[in-house]
Structure formats: C-alpha cells, structure tokens
Image: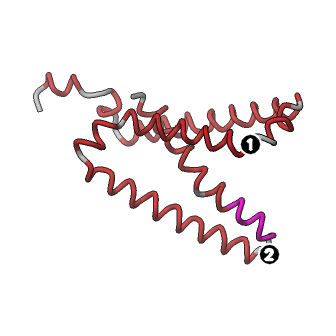
C-alpha cells in the first residue's frame, strides 16, 4: 500500500485495537449514563406511562432504524464481499444462543419467575445487538 492509499483510509482504519478499546470504554459509560438520565426524566414527568402503551411498536421501529442504518452504511461491503459477513454472523448467533442459555439457566437456578427470565433473555441477547450496532456506528464514525 502506498502512502497515498494509506491517506485515503478512513480514520478508524488507522486506529489500533488499543485506541478503539479506549474509545469504547470512554463512550459506552457515557451512552449508558445518557440513557439512564433520559429514562429518569421520562418517569418523573409521567411521559413513560404514556409511552408504555405504545412501547412494543416504538421499540420495533427503533431497532428497524438502527439495523437499516447499519446495513445502509455497509451496503458496498455486503455486496462486494459477502463472505466478510460470515464471521460477524457466527459471533452474533453464538453469542445470542450461548448468552440466552446462560441467562435462562441462571434464572432457573435462582428460581426467578419464568416470565421474568424470558424478559431477561431478550434484554440480554436481542437488545444487546441494537446497542452494539449503535456503539459501532459511534466508534467507527462512518
């Protein structure tokens, strides 16, 4: 690769794993804190109870928006190098099912209500995918 080609790379492609990890450790707590503060504001103002009735569709559309954005930004890679999706898909599938199994087993061992365990499994697996996609968009700054 010539120096001209290396200058054309995106900033995140020049970053080392250590730098990306440092960014992740700095950004992730801020994102979590922002979500926590926003949720408390919604609860105290009473907006949360009004949102609760429409929560399912609102969450579904939010995930659609995140996935649509991620796919749209990576369209060229998906079409030109479809095999590059295989490792990410394998990790996602393995994490989802393994983590779901671990959460379900822990819930049974701790004798947690089965309905609550299902919610915990969904929160621990599916919801993490949306957060990971959002975090990737923030970190990689496409």
Residue 16: x and y in percent read: 34, 38
Range drawn in magenta: 113-120
Disc sitting over residue 55 in the figure: 1
Q: Any magenta on residue 15?
A: no
Left or right relative to 110: residue 58: left
SS of the residue under disc 1: helix
Label whose residue precedes the other's in the sequence (1 or 2): 1
Q: Residues within 10 Å of mark 2 (few under 14, many from 20)?
A: few
SS of the residue under disc 2: loop
Give the residue drawn at x 57%, y 42%.
63
Give me the C-alpha separation between circle 1 and circle 2.
28 Å
Give the residue drawn at x 57%, y 65%.
99
Nearest to the observer: residue 63 or residue 28:
63
Residue 18: x and y in percent read: 40, 41
Model colouring: secondary structure
Nearest to the observer: residue 52 or residue 109:
52
Q: Is residue 52 above or below residue 127?
A: above
Main SS of the magenta part reads helix
- Res 47 → quadrant: top right
Left or right relative to 127: residue 93: left
Left or right relative to 66: residue 85: left
Which residue corresponds to mark 2? 111
Residue 2: x and y in percent read: 10, 28
Q: Residues within 10 Å of mark 1 (few under 14, many from 20)?
A: few
From the viewer's perspective, is the residue at label 1 or at label 2 nearer? Answer: 1
Q: Is residue 102 above or below residue 87?
A: below
Looking at the rendered image, the quarter that the C terminus falls into is top left
Give the residue drawn at x 75%, y 31%.
38
Give the number of marks. 2
């Amino acid at each position: 690769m010539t120096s001209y080609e290396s200058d054309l790379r995106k900033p995140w492609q020049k970053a080392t794993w250590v730098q990306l990890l440092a960014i992740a450790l700095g950004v992730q707590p801020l994102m979590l804190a922002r979500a926590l503060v926003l949720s408390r504001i919604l609860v105290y103002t009473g907006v949360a109870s009004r949102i609760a009735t429409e929560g399912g569709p609102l969450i579904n559309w939010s995930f659609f928006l995140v996935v649509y954005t991620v796919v749209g930004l990576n369209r060229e890679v998906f079409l030109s190098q479809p095999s590059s999706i295989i490792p990410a898909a394998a990790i996602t599938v393995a994490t989802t099912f393994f983590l779901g199994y671990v959460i379900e087993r822990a819930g049974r061992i701790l004798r947690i209500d089965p309905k609550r365990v299902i919610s915990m499994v969904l929160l621990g697996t599916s919801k993490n995918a949306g957060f990971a996609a959002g975090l990737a968009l923030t970190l990689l700054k496409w």
